[in-house]
Image (tube, grey):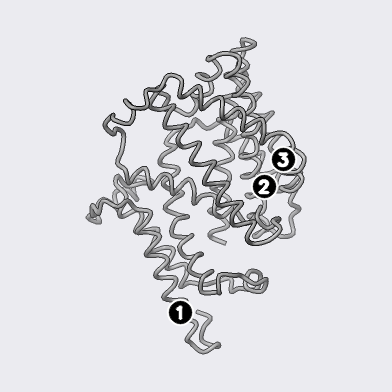
Amino acid sequence: YIPTGLNTLQCLGWATFELIIIAAAASALSDELFGFEARSAWTIVFGILAAVFALLGPVGFVRRVLRRYAVWAVLASLVYLTWWALSEADLRALWDAPGQGGSFWLGVDLVIAITVSWVPLAADYTRFSRDRRSAFWGTGAGYFLGATWMLALGILLVLSRNLTDPVEIPAAVAAAGLAAALALLAVTLDETDEAFANIYSAAVSLQNVLPAVAQRLLVAAVTLVATVGALLVELQNYQSFLLLLGSCFVPLFGVLLADWLLSGARYTRDQIFRAPAWRPELLLAWLVGFVLFHWLHEPPLGPSWWVELVEQANQPNLGIGASLPSFAVSFALATGVGLLRSRLPQTASKW
């Protein structure tokens, strides 16, 4: 239930973030076209829309909205926005410019964090795939291509147009002309699927703890919390949010991968639904990776008392970031205890 709680919290955080960005884009468009922003109203409208999508469920939403309309409109819009970002960019000058703002390994940690935060959500949607191969290649190739494109577009916007605040980007695009505004409109409408995914997955995670509660009720509750959060919270410390997610989910993925491989690279129904509810050896492997991540990351993350504690622990400077060592240690520990457990008598294997 500990991973369930963390995943629910991160889904709420992401849903809140998505609604903030969507409302910022919608208010920028309405201000450019009609002279008013109404950001709070847009937040509520898109919160309701995300809830409707979540109530449709993954299959209904994909078949009725994404596959028919949204994916093509967004593809055309992103092609245009990429051209718009490139139109004033001097690629040779950007390539030759010295690095600023952070180290290479900080960038690696951030990319890993934003990617691994989706790992707990993947099965909520791949369970509707035709087979394992389709699920693997569809998820892997689709995410890789989309994420690579969007990261490259983000780099162009930061370097060529000096847009560093996510909330500033919609206003800059909306002010670039009618075509750019239409492209932003398409992306804004489609971005609702990100909020939908997090709302739906938060409800699925909560059902792990509250199986008797109807999923529709959980969807409504999650939507309400995320929408209120988007109305009240100012978008700050986005980088710290990502790194905190990485510190939790990178070592957790290492433990999950080790357990999956030791199970023959396949989970049976019994292994999923009848596995021991309490496996302290795997929790320990996860905890060690979490602590290692925070020990290696510079500067320390989290509340002041935790930062002071980490600073007193003589942080090393390995120059390889925090994600890869954290993953490797948790994976190795989980593999080791799994192999040891498999050699113990059946009656002694429930630690």
Dot 3 falls on a residue whose secondary structure is helix
Image disc number at residue 300: none
Dot 2 falls on a residue whose secondary structure is helix
Circle 3 residues within 10 Å: few <14, some 14–19, many ≥20: few
The correct choice, above or below, for 219 with respect to 24 in the image is below
Image disc number at residue 339: 1
- How much space separates mark 3 and mark 1, taking CA atoms? 44 Å
Q: Amino acid at mark 3?
A: Arg
Q: Earlier in the sequence, mark 3 or mark 1?
A: 3
Q: Residue at 50% of width from left, 37% of height from top?
A: 149
The correct choice, above or below, for 37 with respect to 335 in the image is above
Q: Earlier in the sequence, mark 2 or mark 1?
A: 2
Report which quarter residue 334 is drawn in. Answer: bottom left
Q: Amino acid at mark 2?
A: Tyr
Which quadrant of the figure contains the N terminus? Answer: bottom right
Q: Position of residue 150 (x, y in %)?
A: 50, 36
In the image: residue 184, left or right of residue 151: right
Furthest-front residue in this view: 92
Q: Position of residue 318 (x, y in %)?
A: 25, 54
Residue bearing the label numbered 2 = 200
In the image: residue 268, left or right of residue 299: right
Q: Residue at 42% of width from left, 19% of height from top?
A: 88
- How much space separates mark 2 and mark 1, taking CA atoms? 36 Å
Dot 1 falls on a residue whose secondary structure is helix
Residue bearing the label numbered 3 = 67
Q: Residue at 74% of width from left, 37% of height from top?
A: 68
Q: Residue at 29% of width from left, 49% of height from top?
A: 308
Circle 1 residues within 10 Å: few <14, some 14–19, many ≥20: few
